[in-house]
């Protein structure tokens, strides 16, 4: 039993079902809690008004209050964790620092550096599982290797869940939180060099209470999730991704909710479909953990031989894609949604990623980086996994010859154009029958709706069928190569 320890919060901004906090309270008489605004991350952000920083800060206010109600509080610093955590640990005189395990390569190197510094000072570094239901070596194939195909991984994951069910925390904690002076407060955005985001933009529901509100709302319609999740104009998804990203809700709690709503009883039902998405999340964390090269290159090395478009045209095409000016309404509406709100519906993420890599022929890493700069819920594992899936370069990826048609995707998943009109108001007068391909309207039809090609209507950047043939040729360099 330790006398006192420090829990370092990172992407786990809650005080319930918290791996490191619960374990620290079981192993120590007194537990200090801290969060570091990491300058290694924040100083690299291009904008000083970042919704994610604002989300973190607002969530920290709620976390601090929750900890104070339990007799503790949250120490918040702004600096480099490699320096701040060892310094704080020595100031507090703790015997150990507890953290929740991270799976990103940079985070693992950071933690290794912090652990080494602490060890030199005689302080333990304890890493706990929290971000995933199963991680590390818990789900392996019969040969003892990590899975690289999702379907058998999913079967093994569900089998392990059945064996271990339910995935609940361990023994109740017995320690106490260390009190924090009332004068110690979470710093303002201004104090860490940021400002509030656009007041006209949609506000995110932050903190544990925001996550619970969204979860309660979703559970009332989870039965329809399988049918409605692909339609961006419908309130069909959970909207919990940003809360999973910053840990204001526990992944174990969500899995238990899925089970409670029949996920293991009806494989085709909404709860089971949603549970499948949570399993994909674990899968991509596992891939990132075991195959860190994916952050720089294709999961399958043979696909690094693909020659992507380069030069002035490629740069112009990329700029058009980023700003929602490709001429394909659903693609453009999706990018406008991302730029305006920091969110994009998952069906649309697949569509715009396919469009970038297979219609425009641009390197998927350019799109991955753009998403990383814009998404409120940016998570390296899921973002990289999704982009490599769409570009057919990743594990268990979509076959390279399966190329999303932006017109049929638009007609199928936004048939009435409700989503398109929300983000492309310049097309508001275009009739439904022409909305998905407005450039095909005759002169008289353009005049009838006062919406003209070259003005509100953009000619498509590329012809999809022509682009498809180019993509098939582009991928021919790997067509006959075996995956590793």
Image: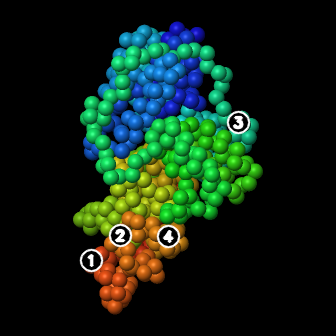
Q: In the drawing, what numbered circle is on residue 425? A: 2
Question: Are the two marked residues, 2 and 4, in contact with CB atoms closer than 8 angstroms?
Answer: no
Q: Residue at x 67, y 35 (%)?
A: 167
Secondary element type, mark 3 = loop
CA gap between label 2 and label 4 equals 15 Å
Estimate the x, y position of residue 240 in percent, counting from the top left: 52, 47
Name the N-terminal-most of marks 2 and 3: 3
CA gap between label 4 and label 3 equals 38 Å
Residue at numbered disc 1 = 455
Name the N-terminal-most of marks 1 and 2: 2
Question: Are the two marked residues, 1 and 2, in contact with CB atoms closer than 8 angstroms?
Answer: no
Q: In the drawing, what numbered circle is on residue 414? A: 4
Q: Is residue 431 above or below residue 171?
A: below
* Quadrant of res 47: top left
Quarter of the image with the N terminus is: top right
CA gap between label 1 and label 4 equals 23 Å
Name the N-terminal-most of marks 4 and 3: 3
């Amino acid at each position: 039993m330790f006398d006192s320890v420090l829990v370092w919060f990172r992407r786990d901004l809650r005080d319930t079902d918290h791996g490191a906090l619960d374990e620290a309270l079981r192993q120590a008489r007194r537990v200090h809690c801290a969060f570091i605004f990491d300058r290694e991350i924040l100083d690299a952000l291009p904008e000083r008004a970042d919704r994610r920083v604002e989300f973190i800060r607002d969530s920290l206010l709620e976390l601090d209050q929750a900890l104070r109600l339990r007799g503790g509080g949250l120490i918040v610093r702004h600096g480099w964790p490699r320096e701040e955590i060892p310094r704080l640990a020595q100031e507090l005189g703790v015997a150990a620092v507890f953290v929740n395990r991270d799976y990103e390569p940079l985070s693992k190197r950071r933690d290794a550096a912090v652990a080494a510094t602490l060890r030199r000072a005689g302080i333990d570094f304890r890493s706990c599982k929290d971000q995933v239901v199963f991680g590390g070596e818990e789900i392996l194939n019969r040969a003892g290797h990590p899975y690289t195909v999702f379907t058998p991984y999913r079967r093994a994951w569900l089998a392990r869940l059945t064996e271990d069910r339910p995935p609940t925390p361990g023994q109740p904690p017995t320690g106490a939180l260390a009190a924090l002076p009332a004068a110690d407060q979470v710093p303002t955005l201004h104090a860490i060099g940021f400002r509030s985001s656009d007041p006209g933009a949609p506000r995110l529901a932050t903190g544990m209470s925001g996550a619970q509100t969204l979860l309660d709302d979703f559970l009332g319609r989870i039965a329809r999730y399988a049918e409605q999740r692909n339609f961006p104009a419908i309130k069909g998804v959970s909207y919990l991704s940003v809360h999973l990203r910053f840990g204001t809700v526990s992944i174990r709690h969500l899995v238990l909710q899925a089970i409670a709503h029949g996920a293991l009883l009806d494989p085709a039902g909404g709860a089971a479909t949603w549970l499948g998405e949570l399993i994909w999340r674990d899968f991509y964390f596992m891939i990132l953990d075991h195959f860190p090269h994916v952050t720089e290159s294709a999961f399958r090395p043979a696909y690094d031989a693909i020659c992507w478009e380069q030069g002035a045209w490629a740069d112009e095409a990329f700029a058009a894609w980023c700003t929602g000016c490709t001429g394909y309404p659903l693609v453009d509406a999706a990018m406008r949604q991302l730029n305006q709100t920091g969110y994009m519906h998952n069906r649309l993420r697949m569509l715009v990623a396919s469009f970038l890599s297979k219609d425009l022929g641009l390197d998927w890493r350019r799109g991955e980086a753009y998403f990383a700069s814009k998404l409120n819920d940016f998570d390296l594992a899921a973002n990289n996994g999704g982009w490599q899936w769409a570009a057919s370069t990743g594990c268990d990826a979509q076959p390279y010859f399966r190329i999303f048609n932006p017109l049929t995707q638009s007609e199928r998943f936004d048939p009435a154009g409700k989503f398109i009109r929300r983000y492309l108001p310049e097309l508001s007068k275009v009739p439904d029958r022409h909305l998905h391909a407005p450039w095909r309207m005759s002169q008289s039809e353009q005049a009838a709706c006062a919406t003209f090609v070259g003005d509100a209507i953009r000619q498509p950047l590329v012809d999809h069928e022509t682009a498809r043939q180019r993509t098939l040729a582009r991928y021919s360099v790997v067509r006959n190569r075996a995956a590793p």
